[in-house]
Image (cartoon, rainbow, N blue to C red):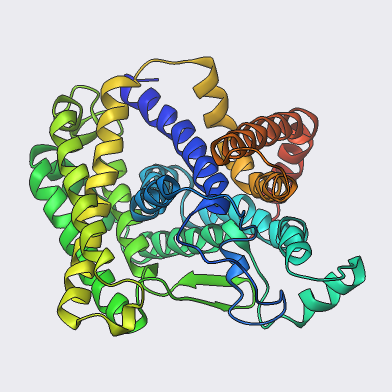
Amino acid sequence: MSRSSVALSNLRGVVIFIVLAFHSALAYVASVPAQTSPFGEAPFTWQAFPVVDPQRWMGFDVFCAWQDVSLMSLMFFLSGLLASGSLRRKGGWTYISDRLWRIGVPFVLAIIFLSPLAFYPAYLARTAQPTFFGFWQQWFSLPFWPSGPEWFLWQLLVANILAAGLFAVAPRSLDLFSRLGAWAGEHPVKFFGLLAGVSALAYVPLALIYTPWSWSAVGPFSMQLSRPVHYLVYFFAGFALGSYALDRGLLASDGPLARHWLAWWGVAAGGFGLWAGLTALTRPEWSQANPLIQTAASLAFPIGCASGVVFLLAVCLRFSDKRHWALDSLSANAYSMYLIHYVFVVWLQYALVGTGLYVIVKYAIVLSGALVMSWASSAAFARVFGAQLVAVRRAVSTVPH
């Protein structure tokens, strides 16, 4: 592996750790009001905050806001990096078959089995006399099927299908993306401006129409209404860089991002501060804020998002270009950990609600416990079932299209 490939692999491990840290903190965010509405009645805020602990800290608000700005966009970006290479090697049909197996099947299994298990504590915390059968009665009466963090999977699958469709209709479009990736390596600041500008076109109109916070769901397919096109922008931005190379240009370990990581830190801090300051002016009720402030806050989001993504890339390219067993293992198990970690997070948060521990201690227990249990479960699953799954997958791939 090249140094850049090692850095990107390590970044995958860093990202899954941040995901666990983010979800572990949600029970302790100070700005979330106490959850008093029943489990089976709107506004169903338990989807975002299954457990709301009485002990909370404003520092978690800042941390979660920072991650909310750029973390998911970075995950779409990293997914796009590898898509073009897979398309070239496998071709459109094999690529789609692979994505359906890799993303579609886990999504279905997760929403059927893991989502009810993860949200059961939300039912316990909001029901005076909870019963097992009462939970299922309310679960099946909901106007949607809660998917939890797995919403990311179906939107990622759509992005992959769009990429494969583009490849099928216009195979030479990959060359255009490759040229864009080469141009980005020569003009990193202009690439940053292009990324922020295009994502602003994708994000701002929807944010002003639906607000930045609104979610909607049809069955298990949930989305944050202001962001689906924005996420596609980041997927195809990564697609462009990956089409050119994973170890040259903007992604080189000694390239323009790595060399100027400190400057990108300043840009990221300024971008987040701009977004946070303007967004604070729209609180507590977005609909009652001045339309000019709403527009300014919406425009600040793409800047804060792009700067945060570029900064994390720059730091990993600069400082994380050597292999380490922990990051190797985290990277290898990242996908499985993403699928299962939320169950451990929510149950640990629920178990600690009645304790008198300090909020920082609770958070540390939840994060460390979820990290160890999801990591160990993923590694054990891979060891026990990995060979069998590979055999089944190969057998399926031999079936004629």
Q: Residue at x 77, y 56 (%)?
A: 117
Is 59 located above or below residue 44 in the figure?
above
Q: Quadrant of the C terminus?
A: bottom right
In x, y percent, where is residue 182? 16, 41
Q: Is residue 254 above or below residue 221?
A: above
- Residue 79, relative to residue 172: is it above or below? above
Give coordinates of residue 319: x percent, y percent. Answer: 30, 20
Residue 294 visible at all: yes
Residue nearest the viewer, comparing 347 with 399: 347
Q: Could you tell me if residue 176 is visible in this image?
A: no
Given the current orientation, which residue lies at the most extreme front position?
356
Query: Which quadrant holds residue 333?
Result: top right
Q: Horizontal placement of 267 versus 236: left or right? A: left
Q: Position of residue 260 (x, y in %)?
A: 13, 29
Query: Residue 120: where, in percent of width, then height?
Result: 77, 61
Q: Is residue 134 left or right of residue 376?
A: right
Q: Name the foreground residue: 52 vs 322.
A: 52
Which of 104/361 is in front? 361
Residue name at image x 35 percent, y 67 percent: 169
